[in-house]
């Protein structure tokens, strides 16, 4: 688990759970099935460097567990793996 600064967290060859915490963190899970866990929206703008999802590859997971994780107006979340990405934008609605 990261601290209150900009941290670099690296998993190993096993199944790891990485929690960046506050700050803009860089998360690298390594081999096997890893979990990238986000607890509060104020955790910062983290970067996952090796997210894998595939039939023959590791199946990593992004886990959002905090109760206050709704998008607010002007907030953008981008999930990208390889050449594919999904973006969600918060509105006032």
Image (cartoon, rainbow, N blue to C red):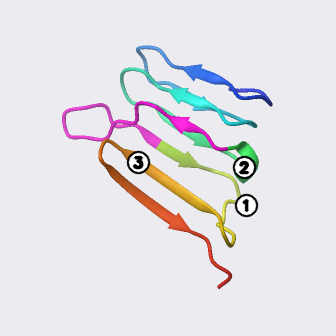
Q: What SS does tag 3 mark? A: strand
As drawn, is 17 to the left or to the right of 25?
left
| Range drawn in magenta | 45-61
Q: Is residue 92 above or below residue 32?
A: below
Spot occupied by residue 61 in the image (x, y as percentages of width and height): 44, 42
Spot occupied by residue 14 in the image (x, y as percentages of width and height): 43, 17
Q: Is residue 87 above or below residue 24?
A: below
The residue at which mark 1 appears reads as 68
Looking at the image, which residue is at 66% across and 69% down?
74
Q: Quadrant of the C terminus?
A: bottom right
Spot occupied by residue 29 in the image (x, y as percentages of width and height): 47, 25
Query: Across the whole image, how many numbered discs are drawn on residues?
Result: 3
How far apart are the two marked residues, 1 and 3, measured between alpha carbons? Answer: 23 Å
Return the mark for residue 80.
Answer: 3
Return the mark for residue 40.
Answer: 2
Quarter assignment of residue 15: top left
Spot occupied by residue 31 in the image (x, y as percentages of width and height): 37, 21
Looking at the image, which residue is at 40% across and 31% down?
50
Q: Nearer the viewer, mark 3 or mark 2?
A: 3
How far apart are the two marked residues, 3 and 2, measured between alpha carbons? Answer: 20 Å
Say which label, 3 or 2, has the lower sequence index. Answer: 2
Quarter assignment of residue 91: bottom right
Looking at the image, which residue is at 25% across and 40% down?
54
Q: Is residue 76 above or below residue 57?
A: below
Q: What SS does tag 2 mark? A: loop
């Amino acid at each position: 688990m990261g601290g209150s600064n900009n941290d670099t967290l690296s998993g190993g060859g096993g199944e790891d759970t990485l929690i960046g915490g506050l700050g803009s963190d860089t998360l690298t899970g390594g081999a096997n099935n890893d979990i990238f866990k986000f607890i509060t929206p104020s955790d910062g703008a983290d970067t996952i460097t090796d997210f894998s999802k595939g039939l023959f590859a590791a199946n990593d997971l992004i886990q959002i567990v905090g109760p206050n994780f709704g998008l607010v107006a002007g907030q953008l979340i981008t999930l990208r793996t390889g050449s594919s990405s999904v973006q969600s934008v918060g509105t006032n609605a």
